[in-house]
Amino acid sequence: MAKAESLKFTKTHEWIHVEGARGVVGITKHAQEEISDVVFVELPKTGTQIGAGQEAAVVESVKAAFSIYAPVSGKVAQVNDRLSKDPALINSSPLDDGWIFALEIQDPKEISGLMSLDQYNRWVTQEKDGSGVHS
């Protein structure tokens, strides 16, 4: 997977790695720390059309269930089947082996509305006094 500096981030703690017209999506290191021990992942169905900001998957931990949102609009091109057998990959490797799904990006312009790593880190620091991870 790409270095964190090349990823784009959402305020709901998802990241996307864009390669051409395709984007691989996962959750941030910060999010997996807040969620804690992941025990189950409900993956989206391949071929499903998802709008930016719409729920795409659900991650369940020992604490609760957390919705995972699509950072941009697109069609689900692939899911990480390894998560069905080993959902803890999200905790152990959130920016690499713990990716959740890949999208065929519908509107590349939506990417410009996402945050860089520096912007995301500043935003997380400001939000620490606020609500934390979405649910």
Image: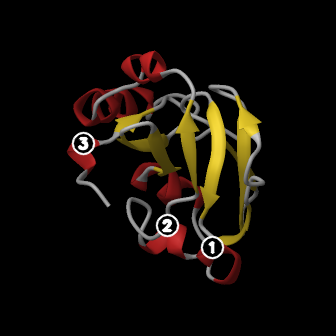
Asked whether residue 87 appears in the rendered view, the answer is: no
Q: Are marks 1 and 2 in contact (CB under 8 Å)?
A: yes
Q: Is residue 32 left or right of residue 19?
A: right
In the rendered image, residue 20, in percent from the top left (x then y), is placed at 36, 38
Q: CA distance from mark 1 to mark 2?
A: 7 Å
Find residue 83 and name its label.
Answer: 1
Local packing at callout 1 (Cα closer than 10 Å; few below 14, some 14-19, many 20+) is many
Disc on the earlier residue, 3 or 2:
3
Q: In the structure shown, which secondary structural element does the residue marked by tag 2 occupy? A: loop
Label 2 amino acid? Gly
Disc on the earlier residue, 1 or 2:
1
Q: Is residue 92 left or right of residue 85?
A: left
Q: CA distance from mark 3 to mark 1?
A: 24 Å
Residue found at x 57% / y 76%: 88
Residue marked by disc 2: 98
Residue marked by disc 3: 6
Label 1 amino acid? Leu
Q: In the structure shown, which secondary structural element does the residue marked by tag 3 occupy? A: helix
Q: Are marks 3 and 2 in contact (CB under 8 Å)?
A: no
